[in-house]
Amino acid sequence: MNEPILLTPGPLTTTLATKQAMLRDWGSWDDTFNALTASVCADLVGIVHGEQTHVCIPLQGSGTFAVEAALGTLVPKGCKVLVPNNGAYCQRIIRILGYLGHEAVELPFGDDQPADPARIGAALLADPAISHVAQVHCETGTGILNPLPKIAQVVAQAGRRLIVDAMSSYGAIPIDLGTMPVDALIAASGKCLEGVPGMGFVIARRSVLIDAAGQSHSLAMDLHDQWTYMQRTGQWRFTPPTHVVAALRCAIDQYLAEGGQPARLARYGENCATLVSNMRRLGFRTFLDDAMQAPIIVTFHAPPDHAYEFVEFYHRVREKGFVLYPGKLTTVDTFRVGCIGAIDVTEIRRATEAIGATLLEMGVQKLG
């Protein structure tokens, strides 16, 4: 039986080579595994051009683990953090800051509005006590892309520090840490690099990480301790996700062979354009205007037809070989379709054909 295509923002469909990379067992203290980890970390920094200023700290767990580790390690206790909020993962950062005991200042935007650098600058000017800004680059709840280069410039001009959740943009959307003033960039193995889930990582400014000794709220999530231990021994402090690291090494090799970030963005962009065009041809409406849409995941309005019900829609499309994603909005009924993973326009065309056939089966006629 063929595996379904995952049209989701992670976990996502991986290549056979990436899957096969997990067939070998690794000793966590073995020199070959330590070399594997070191090579992965070096490439992760290189992808965003941070070799001169930043270092990579890998961490066991999902991307949210890495977000919490970054905020818990790099933001000193008692600091105030501005969070431009235009979606579910911005809201998650606010929740994390609450658990950590940091004061979060929410700067609200609509779900369909990109974060406005001018408003961020005004908020920083109005409150000198704010020390950090925590910004989601691509808000996966809707697929909106926030203008990170302009936001980074505004934050730097205000003399504040910037931590970026780049979970759904890293590896696909251009990010240059050589020119962009960012203290930490956070991502994970199972997104645009097309590895498997299980490892987050933080690419932190070396000087900021060194100054963060003793700041972490947690032993397991102490990025400074993790980094210094790895520098001293070459090993992870605690049992590493060995198979995930091996799969990521293989996925990065394929990423580089494909042409790196520009090639990955081009493929995802073509996937996204094909998806939106075919879905609109069926009658669906996108939640975002095209100018705000990142080629990562697309949110569609659910059909306003009494015959439509997402769970049945999901299962019928799943039977045809494609896994969709539920909506993440609380006020609008939506569903999401991912453009990322080891897929191209061939799979996207087949998926939209399956969606069209499902609508006929369910008797859904009203789509807009």
Image (spheres, rainbow, N blue to C red):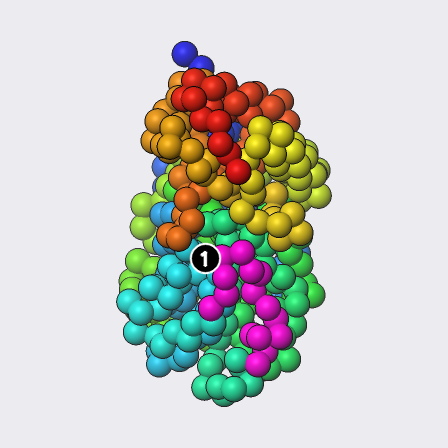
The residue located at (37%, 32%) in the rendering is 306
Q: Residues within 10 Å of mark 1 (few under 14, many from 20)?
A: many
Residue position for label 1: 87
- The answer to whether residue 89 shows anywhere in this view is yes
Q: Position of residue 178 (x, y in %)?
A: 68, 63
Which quadrant does the N terminus fall into? top left
The amino acid pointed to by label 1 is Gly
In terms of secondary structure, where does tag 1 sit?
loop
- Where in the figure is residue 324, as x and y percent of width and height? 44, 32
**Drawn side of residue 367 relative to residue 318, left or right:** right
Residue 308 higher or lower than 198, as above or below: above
Residue 294 magenta = no
Q: Nearer the viewer, residue 197 or 295?
A: 295
Q: Residue at 36%, 37% (x, y): give it.
A: 27
- Could you say where residue 242 lies in the image, as x and y percent from the top left? 39, 38
Left or right? Give the position of 139 relative to 103: right
Residue pictured at 34% horizontal, 64% vertical: 96
Q: Which residues are magenta?
A: 108-122
Q: Nearer the viewer, residue 6 or 358?
A: 358
Q: Position of residue 88 (x, y in %)?
A: 41, 55
